[in-house]
Image: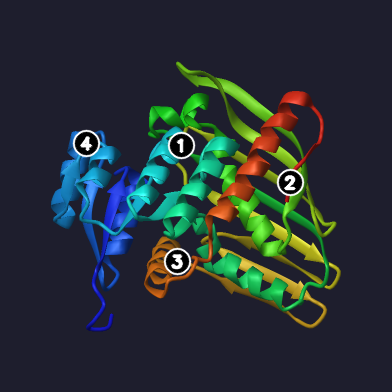
Amino acid sequence: MGGSEQAIRLGIAGGGIMGERVADAAAALAGVEVRAVADANPDSRARLAERFGAAAFATWEELIAAGGIDAVYVGLPHHLHADAACAAADAGLHLLLDKPLCNTLEEGDRILAAVERAGVRLMVGFSHRFHVELATAKRLLEAGELGDVVLATDQIVDSAPNGPAWYWDRAAGGGVVQLQMHHSFDRLAWLLGSPIVRVQAELHEREVGPSGAVDLAAAVTLTFANGAVGTSAASFVTGYDGDGVVELVIQGTRGHVRLETWSHVEAQTARSAFTQRQRRDDWLGAEVAEFVAAIREGRDPSVTGRDGHRALRVALAVKESARTGSAVDVAP
């Protein structure tokens, strides 16, 4: 950081698992200070506030009203995203908004309008883009090593035995489609450089808590604007404590790439073949660093609110397809 640059003061709205991880990643960056933490749990907010020497607040509203920050990470239950994001933008704060963008198109439109009106930066937390394995696949695709993509398959399995109750509350934005599949829809469109324009979906639903049935698994067939087809499947359960795993295969007319996050990427093309082993990388640190760089450089981050809105449109089409049993077109 140059001598004339002031520190970026960050607030954390939502001190859960991801909020704590983002705070750690931000505090590790030169020229970034975690100044405020808001969480409904008094023990969580007190612990994080003491750890980072930050002010503690019971609500995100209090955090924003207090001022003294330049940017805020929003890691709240999904039904609170729109109000918190719009209030932050209206206060002139740059936004790192955990995925999904929000729950409805009306909310998404409202967020994008508030950010545009305020002239602040909005980055949606599609952190999977920052995995080394996915970056390797992206380079191969951009270089044309695979030729024209014809098929892309994406699968994620995850579990959360100790997750908060709202994970299983449809009204709050719980369920696997909102919790996990926005990642899939974003990374596939990003990797292929082509939006998803049609979906056909099936959901597995069951009652996990008092809020009624919620989607625990989903299988979706996809059509991309460039003519490629694909599948996206995801599950999110509570019966055991396991690490989330992403597996992805993309085949083109001149080669294919196959990867598993935190494990390996394999590629075979008309010119060569290789296997790259990978340990856990600092994907979240890379995401937060990109957010900070975008603020400092006065540019849009590499993942924008428009990307979040695009994934939201796909997710809502998936739910509509599962409800009707028919394919649903998605505006690109």
Q: How many angstroms separate mark 4 from mark 3 (CA)?
A: 33 Å
Given residues 54 and 160, the one toward you in this image is 54
Marks 2 and 3 in Cβ contact (< 8 Å): no
Marks 4 and 2, how far apart in space?
Answer: 39 Å
Answer with the quarter of the image where residue 252 lies: bottom right
SS at circle 4: loop
Q: Is residue 134 left or right of residue 221?
A: left
Q: Which residue is mark 4?
A: 58
Q: Position of residue 183 (x, y in %)?
A: 57, 50
Residue behind mark 2? 331
- CA separation in Å, label 1 and label 4: 18 Å
Quarter where residue 249 is shown: bottom right
Mark 3 = which residue?
Answer: 281
Read off the residue under disc 1: 78
- The answer to which of marks 1 and 2 sits earlier in the sequence is 1
The residue located at (71%, 71%) in the rendering is 141
At x 41%, y 38%, the residue is 83
- Which mark is first along the chain, 1 or 3? 1
